[in-house]
Image (spheres, rainbow, N blue to C red):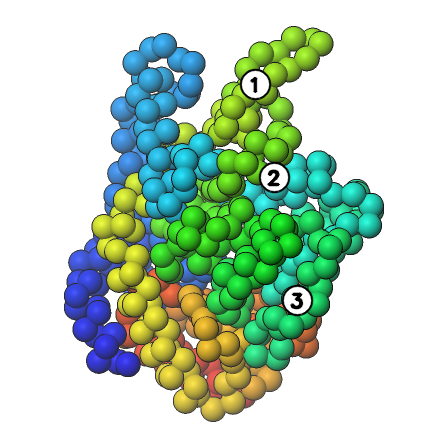
Amino acid sequence: MRENYNDIATALNIEKIRNDFPLLKTTVYGKQLVYLDNAATTQKPTAVLDALDNYYKTYNSNVHRGVHALSQQATEAYEEARKKVARFINAKYSHEVIFTRGTTESINLVASSFGKKFLHKGDSILISAMEHHSNIVPWQMICEEKDASLKVIAMDNKGILQMDDFEQKLTDDVKLVAVTYVSNTLGTVNPVRDIIKQAHAKNIPVLLDVAQAIQHMPLDVQELDVDFIAFSGHKIYGPTGIGVLYGKEEWLNKLPPYQGGGDMIKTVTFEKTVYNDLPYKFEAGTPDMSGAIGLGAAVDYVESIGRKNIELAEGELLAYALDALAAIPDLRFIGESPERSGAISFLIGDLHPFDTGEILDKQGIAVRTGHHCTQPVVDFFRIPGTVRASFAFYNTKAEIDALVKGLEKARLMLG
């Protein structure tokens, strides 16, 4: 595995890639930063930073309806970013791509709009036991409003979804299935193709939270035949505050608008408003123009590296990390699915994850500690939280070695 990773790292020219990310040169407490918190947010390449700088310095203007040159240039760049995202996920039409503030708003949009029209008393929404809070709370809210129920697909003690439980709970009262592609806490890659196939056999639409998948592996919405996906720009080397909701045209046309205001209208009178066509029907108000343009630059950058290359490099890096961490006495992995990506959660003996994280921080090593916005997951394992190391293609074997050394120090210092 380690030789394979070195081969891939050489092929990708990791050192050159790392030079594309200015923040990776940062020192923390006088030590070289080891950034292993990529599931929370990824660092930004110079290409994205330059795109943002260029927008604000040379053609900053509001988009759509403006007749002056700057507005037309901004509109063209904004809509080109939409086309880039559509190509990236292989959407059939660019108007199936809705720009939002992030995964959370994308899911809230579907929960609110879908729920208002299609959810009634006695119906249910089916999610999984490993969902992020942003794929739990919006469904709870609309279910409470509509007197519907929330059903949960069970998982086992390795963090693997129980598909027999899914099949049992996929009953006629289920109006939509909403599951994560990759768990942000456990790293589990869920069998989404099987989930979609079974749901569609009953004419039930599926939403995938791909916030922890899209940066790690190729994703084709037409091949998946998924009805909705949601992801955030900042997880895929783009800016914060920008995200994407993809929806099949037929579904987006069926849903009522999420918010009212400028751009989502065709005509407004005091008696009646006629809503705009897709995608603007769901983009009320001034959008995040710079964010969309920055996301477009991030998509370009990822494609220049190659998504399959990224998947292979990160897969070998993940295997190296699992092997190295397993050698630490008393270390226990939280989430042991053989199908995994992106992140590793663990605990060491009785050490509190916050204490472990603080000692790593003093050594310049950035990891995430806590419940990772998945409180039901940590409650299931009866733990206070985890230490989570999460990886990007710019990480190295040497950084994993530094993590292991840091954890050994924490273990000695804390007991």
**Numbered circles on residues, count:** 3
The reply to whether residue 48 is visible in this rendering is: no
Against 96, residue 397 (above or below) is below
* Residue type highlighted by circle 3: Glu
Q: Residues within 10 Å of mark 1 (few under 14, many from 20)?
A: some
Which quarter of the rendering shows the N terminus? bottom left
Q: Residue at x 33, y 11 (%)?
A: 68
Describe the element under mark 2 as helix, strand or loop.
helix
Q: Earlier in the sequence, mark 2 or mark 1?
A: 2
Name the residue rendered at 69%, 49% in the picture.
175
Q: Is residue 159 left or right of residue 137?
A: left
Image quadrant where residue 111 sits: top right
Q: Position of residue 110 (x, y in %)?
A: 61, 41
**SS for tag 1?**
strand
Which of the two discs, 3 and 1, labels the residue nearer the N terminus? 3
Q: Is residue 314 visible?
A: yes
The image quadrant where one finds the C terminus is bottom right
Name above or below for residue 330 compared with residue 223. below
Taking the image as shown, residue 341 lies to the left or right of residue 316, namely right
- Vertical side of 94 occupied by 235: above or below: below
The CA span between labels 3 and 1 is: 41 Å
Give the CA distance from mark 2 to mark 1: 17 Å
- The residue pinned by badge 2 equals 109
**Foreground disc of the pair 2, 3:** 3
Residue kind at label 2, given as amino acid type = Leu
Query: In the visual, does 4 lie left or right of 123?
Result: left
* Secondary structure found at label 3: helix
| Residue 265 disc label | 1
At 47% from the left edge and 91% from the top edge, which residue is drawn? 329
Q: Quadrant of residue 15?
A: bottom left
